[in-house]
Amino acid sequence: MEKTVTIKNKKAGHEYFLLQELTAGIQLSGTEIKSIREGKASIVDAYCIFKNDELFVIAMHIAEYVFGTYNNHEPKRDRKLLLTKRELRKLHTKVKEKGFTIIPTLLFINEKGLAKLAISLAKGKHHYDKRETLKKKDIRREIDRGRDS
């Protein structure tokens, strides 16, 4: 039985309103995919930007592979995301609008063994929105506790 790898960005739901979600492939080197399969990656501080009509994920940390030699990768290098031209064009027009950004929410290995990144078009929350989200979360937790008792 193969172990599935899912690395979540829990901070994203608290900091942003997640509006639209897409799944993108990632252009990786050999040692990067090996580290991801071991679960040694973090997307907490990562974000996506456009460079020359291509989408890149910035500040995604993939730890160096333990058994890698001089071929090892840089942990926080920019990685190209693989999407169709139509999806890139749609995202690019949305990001040009004020307040929208693209945030990675989930890094996983699919059934074919390829690393995929779930990205979301997001709009930043204000402080009062964050408090409201916390209140709803606390109420939901209390209701769930009442059902279990």
Image (tube, rainbow, N blue to C red):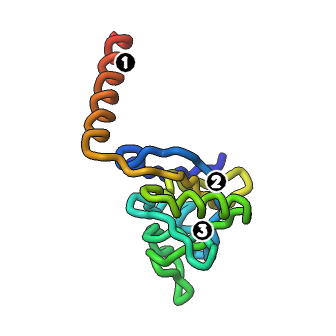
Can you tell which of label 3 and label 2 is closer to the viewer? 2
Using the rendered view, name the quadrant where residue 92 is placed: bottom right
**Quadrant of the drawing holding the C terminus:** top left
Amino acid tagged 3: Ile
**Is 42 left, or right, of 120 in this rendering?**
left
Q: Which residue, given by chain and number where applicable, does mark 3 sit on?
A: 33
**Tag 1 secondary structure:** helix
Of the pair 37 and 146, the residue shown nearer to us:
146
Instruction: Indicate which disc residue 72 carries.
Output: none
Tell me what residue is drawn at x 52 percent, y 44 percent. 19
Of the pair 81 and 95, the residue shown nearer to us:
95
Tell me what residue is drawn at x 62 percent, y 51 percent. 22
Of the pair 131 and 44, the residue shown nearer to us:
131
Q: Which residue, given by chain and number where applicable, does mark 1 sit on?
A: 144
Q: Which residue, given by chain and number where applicable, does mark 2 sit on?
A: 23
Q: Distance between the Cα atoms at labels 1 and 2?
A: 31 Å
